Amino acid sequence: MNLRDINPPPSKKSLIVRLVIVLLAAFVLAELAAYIGCKMFPCHGRSVEVFKEILAAGFLFTAVYHVLTKPMFKEISRRIVVEDQLRKSEADNLAILDSLPDTILRISHAGVLIDFRLESEGVLNVDFGKHVKEMFPEAVVPDIMNCLENTLYSGELQKLDIVVSDWPEEHHQELRFVKYGDDEVLVIISNITDRKMYEEKLKYVSTHDALTGLYNRAFYEAQLERLGKGRQYPIGIIAIDLDGLKETNDTYGHAAGDKMICKASGVLKRVFRADDYVFRTGGDEFTVLLTETSFDGLQLVVTRISTCLDEVNKANPRLKLRLSMGMAIAETRETFHEALRMADLRMYEDKASHKAAKV
């Protein structure tokens, strides 16, 4: 039997109306039969009375069966089918939830934990009757309560990424909020730490040079576009070239050349902070972009590079480095690209002066 094959039962109001009609009809029919019987058989009053009772009882039984009993049987059959389907659906849902490698929290509209299933111990401090603010970091509680409210109001799936500390580790978690009943929400918590680490690694690889660890050419181009449209002026630009790399590659091989490049990048790392924009823009070329700086400040940075280079060469005189440098300041957006060109031009002039001095 399928639920679609069973018509829904009549309402209680309809059943009451039908019962009243049946009783009235039975009474009227019995009285009518008694009246006709008395007229046709005036001498058989007792028999007519018995016939009246039998007729009323038969009519009442038949009417009650069709009006009340049959709909009740239909309702019982319908409830049996509904309960079977609900049990099957619940079993299927439980099987699906059990197969998920996720923590599942059942939370009331007030943010109180009703039931839960933990995927791993120690990450969340959960227990029956606890409020959301007792289980999650304080900073994310408003966002979680907002997602609970939105889920109950709209009925739509909500998502939220949070970080839970379990010293010395941090766990990245994705919370999915699903409406459960009228005033409860299922919060399905997935551990996405590995995915986040992989995404960070991909991001690092896409923005950093594999040999030196400095920012790469692709990131340099992206920053040129961003800074060119920004407001962090004046911007200081230092163009740097590693002298003698081609000769080293030709004479000693590319492994020796790579050592020179890494040594040059090491000099720059000693001078600049990790969050400064230092790029390897070519085989032997480096560029530094410094926002909101002055010409005097830029000259001081170039002096620091030269001082650090001398210290490195003194420590290892057999593999001396020579850096040609050119600098320029972009005061406004309009002069940014011209300043880039001027820094390159001054670097090549410095390179030419090194060659002339060598001769």
Image (cartoon, helix red, strand yellow):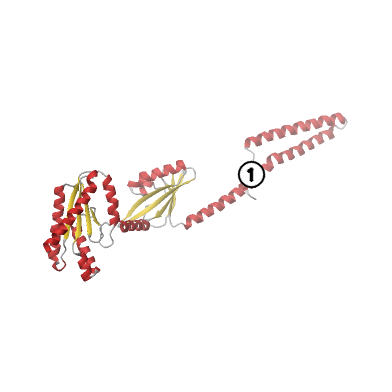
Residue 24 rendering spot, x and y as whole percentages = 72, 32
* Element on which disc 1 rests: helix
Please state if 347 lies on the left or on the right of 63 as rendered. left
Q: Name the residue under label 1.
A: 75
Q: Which of 279 and 151 is in front in this view?
A: 279
> Which residue is at a point 15% across and 63% down the rendered structure image?
312
Q: Nearer the viewer, residue 27 or 200?
A: 200
Q: Nearer the viewer, residue 4 or 298?
A: 298
Other residues around mark 1 within 10 Å, as few (<14) / some (14–19) / many (≥20): some
Name the amino acid, label 1: Glu
Residue 348 rendering spot, x and y as whole percentages = 18, 56
Where, by quadrant of the figure, is residue 216 drawn? bottom left
Q: How many labels does the image show?
A: 1
User: Would you say residue 290 is visible in this rendering?
Assistant: no
* Quadrant including the C terminus: bottom left
Q: Looking at this rendering, what residue extends furthest in the bottom direction?
A: 252
> Which residue is at a point 22% across and 63% down the rendered structure image?
261
User: Would you say residue 192 is visible in this rendering?
Assistant: yes
Residue 283 rendering spot, x and y as whole percentages = 25, 61
Residue 3 rendering spot, x and y as whole percentages = 62, 47
Indicate whether 334 appears above or below 174.
above
Please state if 351 lies on the left or on the right of 178 as rendered. left
> Which residue is at a point 21% across and 49% down the rendered structure image?
339
Indicate whether 36 appears above or below 5.
above
